[in-house]
Image (tube, rainbow, N blue to C red):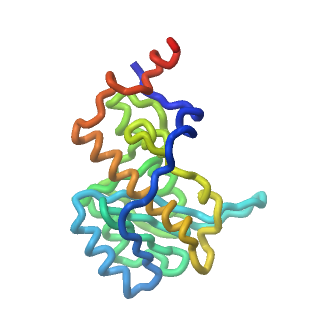
Amino acid sequence: MEISISKQQLAALPAAQFQGTITIVDSLEAVESAVERLRNADLIGFDTETRPSFKKGQTFNVALLQLSSETECFLFRLNKIGMPEPLRLLLEDKGKLKVGLSTHDDFRNLHKKYEFEPYGFVDLQQFVTQWHIIDKSLSKLYGILFGMRLSKAQRLSNWEAEQLSEAQLNYAALDALACVRIYKHLEAGLFHPEESAYQIEQQEEE
């Protein structure tokens, strides 16, 4: 048995909305308190955003690092503050559980500019296979578990803009929060593959 949601099924789902507090961290003074609050969370969701390039050979460094608890997401504007030591130490903390998706890609992009050794990370792409889920995108995983769609409309927007739009903030925060929700939902035993509406065998029989 395998679990997978089609693009058509996903598109038919209602759009998810970020419910929580978004804190923009764009000054060195704000980093320490943000990291301290994140350290009080039992689990941290992780994601990054990079300004897209539309010219051959042109690349940009990671502009935004999102770290989220279940109730609050901190958006670290790396293009403005770099990676201060408290933030680096959090990413390197073996004892602090952090969860993301395709984290090796995020680490590769971050390593283009910053030196750090990530520890304590779980990658959802490997984690979800225990539940026979074969999809790899965050949006599809969220759709399978929660019946909601993560909008991707802001993915190719300018993450180095002087001020990020409300839509960008919500998009970025929701991606990091989604990692927390997916991990906790599965760990709590709330997803039963045999009861899922997205069993591939069922789709083929229809």
Which quadrant is the N terminus positioned in? top left
Q: Where is residue 104 in the image (x, y as percent from the top left)?
A: 47, 50
Who is closer to the viewer here, 121 or 100?
100
Q: Position of residue 121 (x, y in %)?
A: 34, 53
> In the figure, 90 relative to 101: above or below?
below
Question: Horizontal placement of 70 versus 11: left or right?
Answer: left
Q: Residue at x 22, y 59 (%)?
A: 42
Question: Horizontal placement of 141 versus 10: left or right?
Answer: left
Question: Horizontal placement of 157 versus 82: left or right?
Answer: right
Who is closer to the viewer here, 15 or 189?
15
Q: Which residue is drawn at 27% across and 55% down?
A: 97
Q: Which residue is drawn at 45% across and 51% down?
A: 103
Q: Where is residue 106 in the image (x, y as percent from the top left)?
A: 49, 56
Q: Toward which corner of the image does residue 188 lie, by quadrant?
A: top left
Who is closer to the viewer here, 63 or 2?
2
> Count of labels shown?
0
Q: Residue furthest right?
A: 56
Q: Residue at x 64, y 63 (%)?
A: 157
Q: Where is residue 52 in the image (x, y as percent from the top left)?
A: 66, 61
Q: Which residue lies furthest to the top in this view?
A: 205
